[in-house]
């Protein structure tokens, strides 16, 4: 198995790494090498105008990629990095069009997963400035939350010198909260583990609707989709799959795919359970989403897109 040092060297020499983060697994390349970043789009079959998040080792790396770091964004970084949060900031000249999709902003994140931390630190020690990475799935499909799922998604398209690092099942299980920090107030572009209430509390600012017109691929109507048809709510019939809180009973003959006890556990198990439905070749999977907290909202956002035709 590859070490983080080997994986960091692979990045420096222009190869790609799939690596665990606490949200989902990423497929990354050296953000300073255009051909490496280009391959991320090819491997994922992702449209070129959808920007990539640059993953960095330290807060001090922000200044390399961003031209401005507003005070409220600094407060967010201090509170939630390393962690499941991406900040959108005005880009510096180092954040080239091939990363940002020619937008004037750049997305930055410091992940918390120990393997991601080791990789980014080793990469930084070799002089690397940032790792451009997207979720390690084909465009429009479910993000992988373990190394086996990365192999299913991308195995055929990765080269022999690309590396897949195994860090177990991702803790959070859904993608990072994306916060647009290019305006006077923070705006949430993608819901996640870090909630609008927390953002408001930490910054002392009202969280507003984004007006910057930035493109977020997760904002497409259909996204995050398993191959198995997904139905939100309703009643599962014999032979169909079911994902619901543990308090929800399993009707006779229904394939129970997950019984989480909390919204946190629901998010943690969701993508893995949907993949299980694909593996089992079920005709349908029913999901009864949790309710009543911010993570439930983030889960519902993913499920609504996944269920969209
Ligand atoms: O949790 C995560 O964010 C994972 C892990 C691997 O870090 N990454 C991830 O990447 O979900 P991706 O590429 O699948 O989704 C990132 C989203 C995309 O919808 C992209 O459009 C948006 O972030 N994004 C990146 N840079 C942006 C920018 N400058 N402005 C607006 N949106 C941006
Ligand atoms: Mg993605």
Image: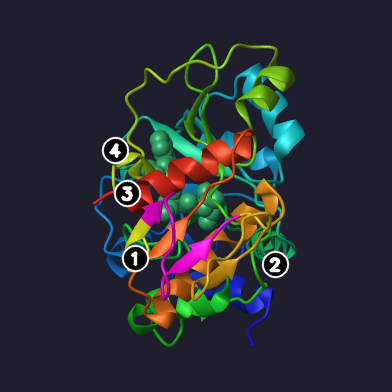
Q: Secondary structure at mark 1?
A: loop
Identify residue for label 4: 102
Report x, y in % for residue 156.
34, 84
The circle on residue 115 is 2
Is 239 in the magenta?
yes
Q: Closer to the observer: label 4 or label 1?
A: 1
| Magenta stretch, residue numbers | 231-244
> Is residue 130 in view from this perspective?
no
Q: Alpha-carbon distance for marks 1 and 3?
A: 19 Å
Front-lying residue, 86 or 263: 263
Q: Secondary structure at mark 3?
A: helix
Decide: marks 2, 4 in contact (CB < 8 A)?
no
Q: Is residue 299 above or below residue 135?
A: above
Decide: marks 4, 1 in contact (CB < 8 A)?
no
Lower position in the chain sequence, tag 1 or tag 3 = 3
Q: Is residue 136 above or below residue 261?
A: below
Q: Closer to the observer: label 1 or label 3?
A: 1
Binning the other alpha carbons within 10 Å of mark 4 as few (below 14), some (14 to 19) or many (20 upward) gives some
Q: Is residue 127 above or below residue 276?
A: above
Q: Secondary structure at mark 4?
A: loop
Determine the residue positioned at 26% across, 64% down.
45
Q: Alpha-carbon distance for marks 2 and 4?
A: 31 Å
Front-lying residue, 63 or 187: 187
Identify residue for label 1: 138
How many discs appear?
4
């Amino acid at each position: 198995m590859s070490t983080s040092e080997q994986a960091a060297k692979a990045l420096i020499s222009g190869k790609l790494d799939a690596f665990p983060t606490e949200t989902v697994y990423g497929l990354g390349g050296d953000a300073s090498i255009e051909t490496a970043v280009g391959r991320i789009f090819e491997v994922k079959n992702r449209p070129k105008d959808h920007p990539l998040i640059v993953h960095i080792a330290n807060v001090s790396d922000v200044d390399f990629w961003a031209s401005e770091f507003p005070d409220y964004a600094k407060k967010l970084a201090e509170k939630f990095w390393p962690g499941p949060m991406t900040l959108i900031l005005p880009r510096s000249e180092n954040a080239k069009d091939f990363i940002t999709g020619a937008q004037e902003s750049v997305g930055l994140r410091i992940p918390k997963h120990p393997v991601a931390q080791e990789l980014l630190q080793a990469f930084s020690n070799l002089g690397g400035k940032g790792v451009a990475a997207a979720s390690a799935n084909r465009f429009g499909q479910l993000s992988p939350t373990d190394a086996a799922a990365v192999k299913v998604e991308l195995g055929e398209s990765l080269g022999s010198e690309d590396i897949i690092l195994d860090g177990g099942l991702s803790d959070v299980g859904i993608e990072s909260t994306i916060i647009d920090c290019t305006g006077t107030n923070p705006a949430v572009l993608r819901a996640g583990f870090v909630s609008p209430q927390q953002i408001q509390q930490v910054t002392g600012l009202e969280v507003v609707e984004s007006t910057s017109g930035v493109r977020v691929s997760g904002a497409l109507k259909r996204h995050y989709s398993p191959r198995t048809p997904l139905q939100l709510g309703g009643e599962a019939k014999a032979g169909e799959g079911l994902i619901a809180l543990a308090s929800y009973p399993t009707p006779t003959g229904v394939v129970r795919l997950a019984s989480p006890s909390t919204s946190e556990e629901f998010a943690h198990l969701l993508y893995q359970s949907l993949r299980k439905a694909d593996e089992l070749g079920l005709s349908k999977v029913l999901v009864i989403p949790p309710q009543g907290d911010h993570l439930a909202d983030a889960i519902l956002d993913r499920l609504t897109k996944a269920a969209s035709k």
